[in-house]
Image (cartoon, helix red, strand yellow):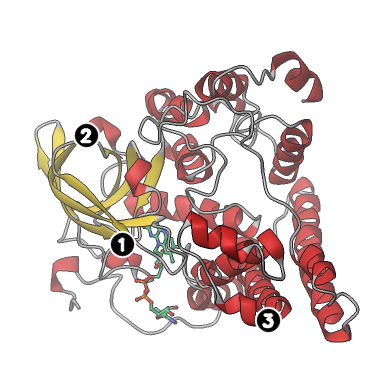
Amino acid sequence: MKEWLEANWDPDLTVGEWWERFGASGWAAPGLPESCYGKGLPRSEVVRVQDAVSEFGALPAPAGLGLLLAAPTIATHGTDEQQERFVKPIVTGAQAWCQLFSEPGAGSDLAGLQCRAERDGDEWIITGQKVWTSGGQVADLGMLLARTNPDAPKHQGITYFAFDMKQPGVEVRPLRELTGRALFNEVFISEARVSNSAIIGGANNGWAVANTTLAFERAGLGAGGGSAGASAAVPGTIAGDLGRRPGGLAGTSPLLQAVAKQVGANTDPLIRQDLARLYTLTEIGRYLTLRQKALRAAGSDLPGIGNIAKLSMSTILRLSRDLGLRLLGPRGTLHAYDTAGTEELTKLPGGRFGGMITEMALFAQAPQIYGGTDEIQHNILGERVLGLPKEPNNDKVTPFRDLPRS
Ligand SMILES: Cc1cc2nc3c(=O)[nH]c(=O)nc-3n(C[C@H](O)[C@H](O)[C@H](O)COP(=O)(O)OP(=O)(O)OC[C@H]3O[C@@H](n4cnc5c(N)ncnc54)[C@H](O)[C@@H]3O)c2cc1C
């Protein structure tokens, strides 16, 4: 990897030129199969490659839901033609993706989704509303779940489409969060179109394909991957980063230990105890990954590891939030929503790290919700790993159109 970077990294390339070179080499998405713009490496090796890229100082691969979710899903379920059409522009950052799963009445109960797709010759006509669509405002394409057969039980009448976001009938409206940012959106779809050849994994087989995406989402989030938008440069044709020079697009830094030292709290035994807990939880996560790697190498697996990793990530963030706010004291209650305010706050204890902590604290509510809430992860572990009985219902046999709706 290092030799490849030495031969190929060039800070004078534009972001688009670098990603084109990086993606085509297979190193931008080394977890994908070699036949699909990857290197076929296991997750632990993928992390090593990512570390090598950042240690070298090169611009990382195009972050976002394209690389995290769409590419591995299409590599698993897509045809050769779809892999060529969709995966290449993802690994080279040419196209950005969003995830059009959740709806106002379908989040945890995702299979209850009502966005509908009706066949019209070689195309499908899509009408419905999606919500919490991270990165929807900069996405070229969306992983769209739509109901194609309301007469089938709810899990069986869903289809997974690669959906063009830049077309008439698609309206993206940003939703502002506590942090002041608008990472996610509502998406209103009114008689938009998608080709039959953009169905991933076959008509009415979308639930199985969606579960692949959700498994990659849990694994990615548990491993520390962020949601869309949290990268140094944004892929796709809309964000406008492809023509930028990568120089100066740096990463972030350690945080809580530095602030503890800065505010003189690093000798406080309770603070030290929580810093140690945080370190321990992070190390347990790392060992869990190593254990899984060893089990996989021996032809076995650790059931539920993705769910456990995701739960652990949301525990770590909550602890970081609580500890960070304790370190900042009253300053932790202040958050700026513009550049001048942010500058002003850097004069207070905690300095520029203080702003990062309050932002993290405000965002810490999110990871226990996205990618399946903590309660849903517990349900999955209970039912699928521990074999506990499911709550009784007749969802699996009743046609979707006969189910009660909220
Ligand atoms: C920051 C962020 C980014 C997101 N990005 C995307 C995105 O890009 N694309 C996308 O499609 N979606 C996205 N989501 C949506 C996310 O997947 C949903 O919010 C999540 O699945 C929960 O659905 P809901 O909000 O409808 O809550 P609900 O499903 O209504 O749940 C409300 C509460 O009830 C609990 N609950 C529900 N059912 C059960 C049950 N059976 N047992 C126990 N407790 C239960 C939940 O745990 C929760 O506490 C995002 C969410 C957030 C916060």
| Residue holding disc 1 | 155
- Horizontal side of 305 relative to 120 (left or right) equals right
Q: CA distance from mark 3 to mark 1?
A: 49 Å
Q: Is mark 1 within 8 Å of ligand 1?
A: no
Image position, residue 2 (x, y; %): 80, 25
Q: Earlier in the sequence, mark 1 or mark 2?
A: 1
Camera-side mark, 3 or 2: 3
Q: Earlier in the sequence, mark 3 or mark 1?
A: 1
Amino acid type, label 1 = His
| Residue holding disc 2 | 196
Q: Residue at x 69, y 29 (%)?
A: 58
Q: Residue at x 32, y 81 (%)?
A: 393
Q: CA distance from mark 1 to mark 2?
A: 20 Å
In the rendered image, which quarter is residue 315 located in?
A: bottom right
Amino acid type, label 3 = Gly
- Horizontal side of 34 relative to 174 (left or right) equals right
Image position, residue 320 (x, y; %): 68, 72
The answer to whether marks 3 and 1 mark residues whose Cβ atoms lie closer than 8 Å is no
Category of crowding for the residue at label 1, using alpha-carbon neighbours closer than 10 angstroms: few (below 14), some (14–19), many (at least 20):
many
In the rendered image, which quarter is residue 79 located in?
A: top left
Residue 229 in sight here:
yes
* Closer-to-camera residue (386/74): 74
Amino acid type, label 2 = Asn
Image position, residue 13 (x, y; %): 59, 17
